[in-house]
Image (cartoon, rainbow, N blue to C red):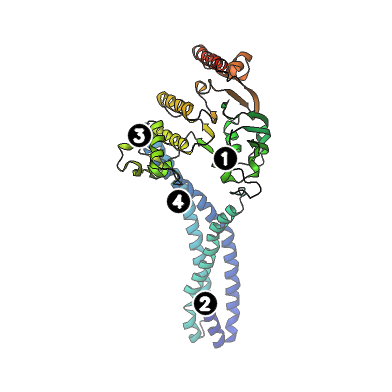
């Protein structure tokens, strides 16, 4: 386009005057377009994401959707997301076409101004398409820069701490030995808001089985986040005297096993799910599967340990996926085990199997159990009761029931029959500790 205007100016220098006006008007129109197009493109990206997310969620939960007859609700929701995206996409296309139309009309006005000069006119005929193409492409470039903006936002997110410990603070090879956990005035904040955990101080002895209970939002899972340093706590968390903030994340997290409420099963072979870092033999894996009573299930799979599991473990039930996670924890032989409501979504038979397996295989380990079912933690060595992020009570279940505090109220709300059952379980566990000399 610039070359054409130069040719026109050589033929008749006076014709450069309307060219200057054409260039100036084009820049002004482009500036007006960019102001709106950038926000429209950003809005189009925001309305596109829910469409993809909804389709993915629907496909993953297709069996449940059909079981509950919720097809129409999900179909209507998809149409809502699709309409929102189509509307913003239409606005974006309309703005882009309007810019092209205005650029063409400006070129037509320029052609009319130089129509008296035939040679220049022949060259200027090409100006219409070239100008529109140039303006639209430069505007499109700026519109697509919204994608770059989103990437830059990720680069500005707060970074995690170092993955590996430096030589000065690297823990010993046999750390932790006793798995004693000390919380010293520990608090936790999310996004600089109000603290979700407030000034918690307590000590968990090595090998203790600790139940963590509290109402929804009390901060139970936040303790796990602080322990794994998913969010950096204030105060100190010591494991066998080592401050967790002084060591690398890899050194910390590889020593703690976790079984979450939603079991994580990778796409790939059973061997890769049990031993993703290829550190153990097949014999060790079969022993771990024996402990969770999955040997016969894996034996029936084509390829046995090399059998491929579908995405999210779709060819296993929820209980079986939970047992795979437990087998993974058994294989690693960590000194600290975290159960984050691990039995909330399984039947009572699988719940009993998980509890029995943990007692047999993690008897010398420190076990932290977050649970809504009070019967799963009633025989723990001690129970930590949270309320609104604060430590309310921390003692043996039987003693807490006698104190008639927060834990007593929680047990009372389960009903008279269940309360009596829980009381008897707590009393039996208390007496057993007294008789075996393990009273804390």
Give the Cα separation between the discs numbered 2 and 3.
74 Å
Residue drawn at point x = 50 percent, y = 57 percent:
92
Residue drawn at point x = 31 percent, y = 37 percent:
299
Looking at the image, is mark 1 or mark 4 nearer the viewer?
1
At numbered mark 4, what does the secondary structure look like: helix, strand or loop? helix
Q: Position of residue 314 (x, y in %)?
A: 37, 39
Mark 1 nearby-residue class (10 Å; few <14, some 14–19, many ≥20): few
Q: Earlier in the sequence, mark 2 or mark 3?
A: 2
At numbered mark 1, what does the secondary structure look like: helix, strand or loop? loop
Mark 3 nearby-residue class (10 Å; few <14, some 14–19, many ≥20): some
Mark 4 nearby-residue class (10 Å; few <14, some 14–19, many ≥20): some
Give the Cα separation between the discs numbered 1 and 2.
73 Å
- Residue indicated by mark 1: 174
Mark number for residue 1?
2
Q: Position of residue 101 (x, y in %)?
A: 49, 66
108 to 151, vertically: above or below = below
Q: Earlier in the sequence, mark 1 or mark 3?
A: 1
Give whichever of 409, 162 is nearer the camera: 162
Instruction: Say whether residue 179 is left or right of residue 201.
Output: left
Give the Cα separation between the discs numbered 4 and 3.
51 Å
Q: Position of residue 393 (x, y in %)?
A: 64, 22
Report the residue that reaches farthest toward the bottom: 11
């Amino acid at each position: 386009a610039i070359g054409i205007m130069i040719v026109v100016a050589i033929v008749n220098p006076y014709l450069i005057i309307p060219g200057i006006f054409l260039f100036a008007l084009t820049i002004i129109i482009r500036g007006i377009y960019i102001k709106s197009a950038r926000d429209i493109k950003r809005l189009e990206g925001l309305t596109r994401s829910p469409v993809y997310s909804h389709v993915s969620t629907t496909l993953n939960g297709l069996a449940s959707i059909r079981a509950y007859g919720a097809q129409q609700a999900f179909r209507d929701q998809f149409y809502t997301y699709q309409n929102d995206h189509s509307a913003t996409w239409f606005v974006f296309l309309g703005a882009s076409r309007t810019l092209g139309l205005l650029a063409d009309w400006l070129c037509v006005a320029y052609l009319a101004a130089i129509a008296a000069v035939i040679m220049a006119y022949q060259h200027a005929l090409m100006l219409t398409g070239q100008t529109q193409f140039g303006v639209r492409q430069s505007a499109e470039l700026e519109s697509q820069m919204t994608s770059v903006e989103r990437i830059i936002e990720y680069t500005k997110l707060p970074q995690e701490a170092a993955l590996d410990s430096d030589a000065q603070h690297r823990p010993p090879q046999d750390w932790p030995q006793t798995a004693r956990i000390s919380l010293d005035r520990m608090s936790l904040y999310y996004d600089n808001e109000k603290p979700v955990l407030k000034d918690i101080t307590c000590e968990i002895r090595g090998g203790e089985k600790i139940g963590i209970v509290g109402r929804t939002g009390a901060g139970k899972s936040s303790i796990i986040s602080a322990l794994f340093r998913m969010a950096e706590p204030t105060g100190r968390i010591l494991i066998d005297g080592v401050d967790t903030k002084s060591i690398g994340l890899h050194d910390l997290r590889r020593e703690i096993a976790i079984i979450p409420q939603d079991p994580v099963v990778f796409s790939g072979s059973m061997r890769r799910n049990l031993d993703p870092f290829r550190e153990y033999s097949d014999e060790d894996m079969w022993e771990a599967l024996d402990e969770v009573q999955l040997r016969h299930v894996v034996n029936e799979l084509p390829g046995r340990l090399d059998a491929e599991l579908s995405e999210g473990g779709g060819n296993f039930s929820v209980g079986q996926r939970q047992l795979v996670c437990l087998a993974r924890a058994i294989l690693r032989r960590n000194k600290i085990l975290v159960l984050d409501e691990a039995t909330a979504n399984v039947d009572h038979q699988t719940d009993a199997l998980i509890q029995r397996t943990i007692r047999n295989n993690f008897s010398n380990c420190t076990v932290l159990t977050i649970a809504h079912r009070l019967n799963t933690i009633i025989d723990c060595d001690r129970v930590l009761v949270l309320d609104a992020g604060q430590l309310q009570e921390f003692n043996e279940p039987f003693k807490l029931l006698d104190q008639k505090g927060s834990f007593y109220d929680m047990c009372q709300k389960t009903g008279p029959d269940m309360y009596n059952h829980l009381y008897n379980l707590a009393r039996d566990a208390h007496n057993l500790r007294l008789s075996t000399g393990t009273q804390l």
